[in-house]
Image (spheres, rainbow, N blue to C red):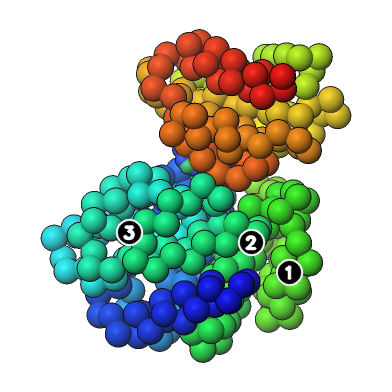
Amino acid sequence: MNNSINQSIKEAIELIKDSDNIYIVSHVQPDGDNIGSTLALGLAIKKLKGKVNIVKVDDIPSYLMFLPGVDMIKEQDITAPIDLLISLDSSDLDRLGIGKEFALKAKKIINIDHHITNENFGHINIVSPTSAATAEIVYDFIRELGISIDKDIATCIYTGISTDTGSFVYSNTSSRTHLIAAELLKIGIDAELININLYQSKSMPSAKLFINSLSHLETYLDDKVGLVSITREMLMENNAKMEDTEGIISFIRGIDTIEVACILKEMDEEEIKVSLRSKKHIDVSKICRKFNGGGHIRAAGCTIYEEISKAKQLILDEIISTFR
Ligand code: AMP
Ligand code: MN
Ligand code: MN
């Protein structure tokens, strides 16, 4: 963490101490890092101030429902006063969905994130692209806040770090990541329980969707690019939900020849959520930026507002052109 980030953390803590109506917002299609960071900081602020409001902006995937404090994430009244809003793990205001309206109403915004594409939309921006997860930044933040990290907070931070590093496998994993994880284990988290919830609780419809979708794997450029499309029809056939696509893209990247893995999810007829992952060379955040998305070098996403076959062609053309 460099000096300017440390300084921003100090300023943010002063602001939290001086603010009354504090809101934390999750992002759309929340993941483990987003919910883990949100709950960890929410629990810490609750300890400090007795109260915190956490805005639910989207459904929470079932594999995260075991997290301590998850009931604190609720739909909130937009007409209430908002002195301070904290955004976690979101590169821009649009990723906050309905949370954007809360942000625009707030007197002050603290933006804590690790995406290189972060737009610094806060009054205070704590953006650290070298951190593997927003939860890593939150760990430092809570320590600086002077709140002891108990088992519940530690469970949420561990979940954020584990999910954003693919269980400490992705290239964003650093020595610092392991040092923080070691501290969390020392606090007494139940890592076995966390791991079973995160990685060994796939539902049967999800397993069926996994098998079905991978049987339609398409590859391009001598198997360097792998792509799967998930249509709403496929979800119906397998009795599955969009969140059940978790794990498919990592599997594709796991194939030895693959450099770029792509999954297209048909959220609506002309709303296609695209996820990209790369292995060693390609910066997929640059590709997603072309479609108003963003993310990291090795993991990024965007939404293309076209029908699925057209969206596929558009993203494939961009992927293929980056190999030239
Ligand atoms: P996903 O493929 O949705 O798991 O996202 C991969 C990474 O890219 C995550 O860090 C996301 O936060 C980020 N990301 C996904 N979609 C978008 C988007 N539309 N705009 C900005 N960042 C995104
Ligand atoms: Mn996220
Ligand atoms: Mn993250």
Question: Which corner quadrant holds the C terminus?
Answer: top right
Q: How far apart are marks 2 and 1 (CA)?
A: 9 Å
Look at the numbered discs 3 and 2 and tell me whether their residues touch, using CB distance below 8 Å: no
**Residue placed most toward the observer, 89 or 281:** 281
Work out whether 195 lies above or below 124.
Answer: above
Question: Which corner quadrant holds the N terminus?
Answer: bottom right
Q: What element carries label 2?
A: loop
Residue identified by numbered label 2: 131
Residue placed at 56% from the left, 50% from the top? Answer: 116
Lower sequence index among marks 3 and 1: 3
Q: Is residue 230 rendered to the left or right of residue 202?
A: left
Residue identified by numbered label 1: 176
Q: Is mark 2 within 8 Å of ligand 3?
A: no
Q: Is residue 177 rendered to the left or right of residue 302?
A: right
Residue 245, image quadrant: top right
Q: How crowded is mark 2: few (under 14 residues within 10 Å), some or many (20 or more)?
A: many
Residue identified by numbered label 3: 55
Look at the numbered discs 2 and 1 and tell me whether their residues touch, using CB distance below 8 Å: yes
Q: Where is residue 8 in the image (x, y as percent from the top left)?
A: 47, 74
Q: Distance between the residues labelled 3 and 1?
A: 30 Å
Q: Does the residue labelled 1 lie within 8 Å of ligand 3?
A: no
Work out whether 295 lies above or below 256.
Answer: below
Q: Position of residue 147 (x, y in %)?
A: 51, 86
Q: How far apart are marks 3 and 2 (CA)?
A: 25 Å
Residue 247, image quadrant: top right
